Amino acid sequence: MELKRIKEERVTAAVAALVERLGGPAMTVRKFIPGEDHTEQLNHVAQAMKDLREEKRRGLFDYPGGDDEYSEALVDERRRLATLPHRPAAWGDVDPSLLAPG
């Protein structure tokens, strides 16, 4: 009986070591993660604001409030774009369980 108990202990220890080894590092998938950059849109808004200031300076708005509405819209858009994230594109390791099927 003693020999059987020793074999059981060795098998149990071997299985435990195998489970620990296999369960150690997490499995990941390498995936391209697109970047997000709104610099071009911000530059477009900045140029539109510059153009608006020049048009206002030249007196091209012939009705009251027209430039104010446009200016407010540009400021709102600039603020919105400035709050959006900015990150470069990169390759990253992703947990496969987090990926959408298909």
Image (cartoon, helix red, strand yellow):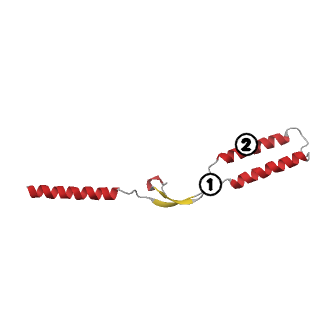
Residue occupied by mark 2: 76
- Residue type highlighted by circle 2: Asp
Residue 27 place in picture, x, y as percent = 41, 58
Residue occupied by mark 1: 36
Do tag 1 and tag 2 residues touch (Cβ < 8 Å)? Answer: no
Along the horizontal axis of the image, is 83 left or right of 97? right
Q: Secondary structure at mark 1?
A: loop
Which quarter of the rendering shows the N terminus?
bottom left
Q: Residue placed farthest to the top in the image?
A: 64
Snapshot quadrant of residue 75: top right
How many residues crowd around disc 1 within 10 Å: few (fewer than 14), some, or many (20 or more)?
few
Q: Residue at x 45, y 56 (%)?
A: 96
Along the horizontal axis of the image, is 72 left or right of 34? right
- Residue type highlighted by circle 1: Glu
Q: Residues under labels 1 and 2: Cα distance? A: 20 Å
Compared with 56, 100 (above or below) is: below
Along the horizontal axis of the image, is 44 left or right of 32? right
Residue 49 place in picture, x, y as percent = 80, 48
Q: Residue placed farthest to the left in the image?
A: 1
Along the horizontal axis of the image, is 60 left or right of 7? right
Q: Residue at x 88, y 38 (%)?
A: 64
Residue 55 place in picture, x, y as percent = 87, 48
Q: Residue at x 11, y 57 (%)?
A: 4
Q: Residue at x 86, y 49 (%)?
A: 54
Residue 76 place in picture, x, y as percent = 73, 42
Compared with 59, 15 (above or below) is: below
